[in-house]
Amino acid sequence: MKYILVIDQSTSGTKALLLDEQGDLAGRADLPHKQKRNSQGWVSHDPMEIYQNTLAVAARLIQETNLQPKDIQAIAISNQRETALVWDRATGKPVADAVVWQCGRAQPICQRLENHAQAVRQKTGLGLSPYFPAAKWAWLLENTPGLEGLSLCCGTIDSWLVYKLTGQFKTDYSNASRTQLFHIHSLAWDQDLCRLFGIRPDMLPEVCMSDSRFGETDMEGLLPGPVPVHGVLGDSHGALFGQGCLAPGMGKATYGTGSSVMVNLGSRPVSPGQGIVTSLAWGMGGQVNYVLEGNINYTGSVIQWLVEDVKLLGSSKEAGALAAMANQADSTYLVPAFTGLGAPYWNPQAKALLWGMGRGTGRAEIVKAGEESIGFQIADVVRAMSQEGLALSQLRADGGPTRDPYLMQFQADILGLPVAVPHQEELSGIGAGYCAGIALGLYPKDISARMRRREYLPQKDQAWREQRLAGWRQAVEMLLK
């Protein structure tokens, strides 16, 4: 039996997935890593912990599945995208903790570059924001002591793992397009943008096709010999590929710590309005595909907040059932701008708001507001995309929160669209694994067409939808005043 080993490195932890010759999930192991937060709201990860966890989950997966390591044909990687780190090329050691995509500490850098925002957007498809790695790298280079004389690598989590596993400093088109330094039309690092952010091009990785051979690794002796690292994709791009959204106009939402709503544009990019961005979906078979995307900071992490911080829930699994028990006429709205608002508002200064409570509002109603805040935010991005002429006929959904029937039904109701949830959950990693397997000739190019899904159909009318959306928009407007 031949297998693909996938490393799915997310915001909260690292998973190892095993895909068999049919592309089915044959095993999984995972480990969390520490979320470092300070009083200023900065969010960091330890890159060495992430790398050690990568090796550990692979070893655990092999042990738990009784896999013969010699049967692993390739390693694929999907990763949290905009998390940025800098390391010393000579020692392979990070010079500081990684700055997580949620972290807004680089906002002052973006403020001083505000006059260049239009040029940044024209070249990269991205609005100038501390969300993206360019400002994060600039912040690390400006605020980390002892960097003089070092040969530095500025990378995202994919390039960090590829470097540690293979010794090669490479990234793929999907991740490069999210850095705010990559020209998505000329398909190269932009020299002017590099100068603008104070980052030398030689600090940046080689950009490769997502299905290319990134190097070889034996995972520090875990495998009997070197195997290729073949498929590398940012997590949301991996989910788009795994969901089978291969034709222009097909879209999906990935529900994780935050969320990405992404629609395939094919080979021709568009220049959207301010609320959403254009990126590269992937590079495969010598060609690139573009996507339209909206990113949301807090979706699944809203439920985590209800569990860990305000302790209204014992576990995230309780959320949907409790929300269903709430008074459905309650008008409480939660706008979870804990570290600013993402798409389509892009306001890093915004603060969270709980609004519209009545005397009858209790624990269940607040949990309901938290659940529904996820659906409202997704609906905002889908509406922004429809204004660009991309009206979806169906939204494909993936990620842990899709196990919540209350949330998925609410999502279908508030969108007025069918929401299709695959029976497989690990779509980000599966998509990267499909990419590697296709490159090896192990899988057919249309393997994602085999995916089975449960479809949630809208059950509410337009009047209900408009009333609920009006209340949500009023809450958001109060926050943005």
Image: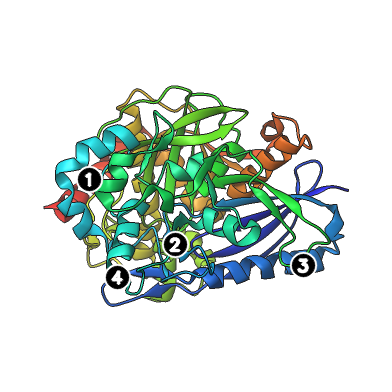
Mark 4 residue element: loop
Name the side, left or right, on which 6 lies relative to 470.
right
Q: Is residue 80 above or below residue 176?
A: below
Q: Secondary structure at mark 2?
A: loop
N-term-proximal mark, 2 vs 4: 4
Q: Nearer the viewer, mark 2 or mark 3?
A: 2
Residue located beneath label 1 in the image: 473
Q: Which residue is mark 4?
A: 41
The residue located at (26%, 73%) in the rendering is: 40
Q: Give the mark, 2 or 3, whose residue is nearer the N terminus.
A: 2
Distance Cα–Cα, label 2 vs label 1: 49 Å
Q: Earlier in the sequence, mark 2 or mark 1?
A: 2
Residue 221: which numbered mark, if any? 3
Q: Amino acid at mark 1?
A: Arg
Secondary structure at numbered mark 1: helix
Q: Residues within 10 Å of mark 1 (few under 14, many from 20)?
A: some
Near mark 2 (Cα within 10 A), the count class, few <14, some 14-19 or many ≥20, is few
